[in-house]
Image: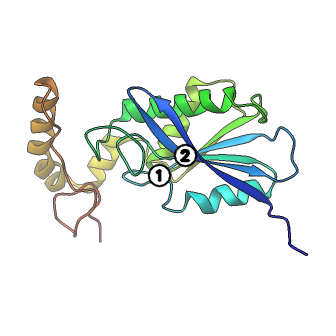
Amino acid sequence: MATKKPFTRHDVLFSSGDSSCAAWLYLPTGVTSPPVVILGHGLGATRDMRLDAFAERFARAGIAAFAFTYRHFGDSGGRPRQLLSIRKQLADWDAAISWVKARGGLDSTRISVWGSSFGGGHAITVASRHPELRAAVAQCPFTDGLASALALGPAASVKASPVVARDLVAKVGRRAPVMIPLAGPPGSLALMNAA
């Protein structure tokens, strides 16, 4: 006799801004109108970088889970690719909440957000803007860019300053963004370069 799976996973595409975000919806088996937790990842990551492990744990506990990838990354839409826009990522969270509220079969009065790293900072911001949410979980949140820059030291900040300035000029001139590597060896110009 086959064992019944504790949850089902559905591929979802929802609109956000001028594009769309790819997501997985995990529905716990045998639970009518379950509460929902929306999961967002960290800087430069995508939902398939182990958000599924957390979503599966929630689903096994009887909680629906909605794990998504921000626009401009992974299998979500958006041009240019690999663009980090805090404003757009926060709009993606808002769009995910709206999608969950509009979908039948879920308890739209019991929605929570869960973010990891940079997404943890987003979860805090999103929760402050959505008082209807029941909970917000921020796993090792990135919450203060200035404090993080100071922790890197003045040499790293000085090294990144010309790139930041060129990116701001490009934005004002409506040109392509100036890119910087997400990760690199210690001392290199990258967003994460610790040993």
Question: Callout 2: helix, strand or loop?
Answer: strand
Q: In the image, what residue type sits under mark 2?
A: Ala
What residue lies at 38% left-to-right and 29% top-to-bottom? 87
Residue 9 appears left or right of 23: right
The single residue placed furthest to the right in the displayed view is 1
Q: Which mark is residue 117?
A: 1
Residue 135 visible in the displayed image: no
Residue at left offset 68%, top offset 38%: 112
**Quarter-of-image position of residue 83:** top left
Judge left or right: residue 195 versus residue 106. left
Looking at this rendering, what residue extends furthest in the front direction? 1
Q: Looking at the picture, how far across and down is residue 8, in whole percent?
A: 73, 55
Q: Is residue 46 left or right of residue 165?
A: right
Left or right of residue 99, residue 179 in this image: left
Q: Is residue 4 above or below residue 182?
A: below
Residue 15 or residue 172, whichever sits in front:
15
Quadrant in the rendering for residue 60: bottom right
Q: Within 10 Å of the Cα at label 1, are there few (<14), some (14-19), or many (20+) other Cα atoms?
A: some
The residue at which mark 2 appears reads as 23
Between disc 1 and disc 2, the foreground one is 2
> Helix, strand, or loop for circle 1?
loop
Residue type at numbered disc 1: Ser
Residue 176 picture quarter? top left
Contact flag, marks 1 and 2 (Cβ < 8 Å): no
